[in-house]
Image: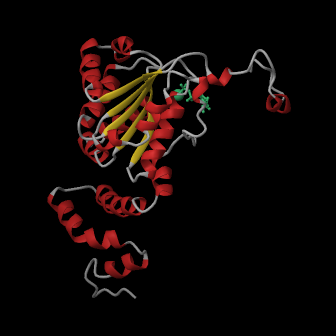
Amino acid sequence: MSTTTDKPGERLPYLISKLKAPRIAERLDQTASSARENSWSYEQFLETLLEAEVFARDASGTRNRIRHASFPANKSLEDFDFTAQPAAERPLIQHLAQLAWVTEHANVCFFGPPGTGKTHLAIALAIRACQEGHRVAFATAQQWIDRLEAAQHSNSLDQELKRLERYGLLVIDEIGYLPLERQAANLLFALIARRYERGSVIVTSNRGFEAWGEILGDQMVAAALIDRLVHHAQIIALKGKSYRLKDRGSQVKPTDQAAGLRPSA
Ligand code: ADP
Ligand code: MG
């Protein structure tokens, strides 16, 4: 039992060992001195400590890395129909699945109309990266911007960008679905500029680079961003009709009938 004679923090080693959090035990003293020196908030101190533990645990398993990446769906190269999308050349995609490019901090860009498999291939490659032990984070461009805006509002944009350097691969999905405000475009630029030669990104977009000036609302920002993105990058332009509409119109699939859907739904 704690008594008034206990020094503050005296029971921490015991409490931390009860939580089975050895990384917190290891880093407690050093993190506490950094916090004092740099006048961190309580939240920042706790976050730094918890992150050390959480990341170390994540590193111990693909399953955890995949969960941590927050993919919107589970997609694999095995369930990608390459005959339906000849623009995604199987040997090239299989080469990318070896992930040398992630080790080299290079990038992959998928372009193409909606439903052509951009997000599918991005997730499939990113899951491979999780399996190979890379830390991965997936979000749409808008979600990345929201996250960076929140960091900026709490004066921690630089810290957040630095924190993201711990990830081997970031997926930025759906650049170009909506035109961006100036501030949002600057944040997207900051994210990609920070990744340059430090870590990899996969970006997907339904608009070609020629339209990015319009999306970002500024030709110079777009040019500078594209320059960093493509310096070391594989660019893949998917083509054709949406896979979502495949086989629709001409026939009703049995599953659609079962669900009471019309072919055009
Ligand atoms: P995009 O991101 O280009 O809009 P998605 O990757 O989200 O398209 O694809 C839409 C849906 O169709 C997803 O469920 C995806 O798994 C599936 N899909 C797309 N292309 C293929 C393909 N070639 N083989 C198998 N499934 C595909
Ligand atoms: Mg998509």
> Is residue 190 depicted above or below 199 in this figure?
above
Residue 73 in percent (x, y) is at 57, 40
Splitting the image into 4 quarters, where does residue 229 fall?
Answer: top left
Q: In the image, is 48 to the left or to the right of 74? A: left
> Is residue 256 depicted above or below 67 in this figure?
above
Q: Residue at x 16, y 56 (%)?
A: 38
Q: In the image, is 229 to the left or to the right of 20? A: left
Q: Residue at x 42, y 75 (%)?
A: 20
- Extreme-left residue of the structure: 37
Residue 57 in percent (x, y) is at 41, 63
* Total marks in image: 0
**Quarter placement of the C terminus:** top right
**Quarter placement of the N terminus:** bottom left
Residue 166 in percent (x, y) is at 30, 49
Image color mode = secondary structure
Q: In the image, is 141 to the left or to the right of 217? A: right
Splitting the image into 4 quarters, where does residue 92 fall?
Answer: top left
Splitting the image into 4 quarters, where does residue 60 fall?
Answer: bottom left
Q: In the image, is 101 to the left or to the right of 86? A: left
Q: Residue at x 30, y 58 (%)?
A: 48
Q: Residue at x 27, y 78 (%)?
A: 8
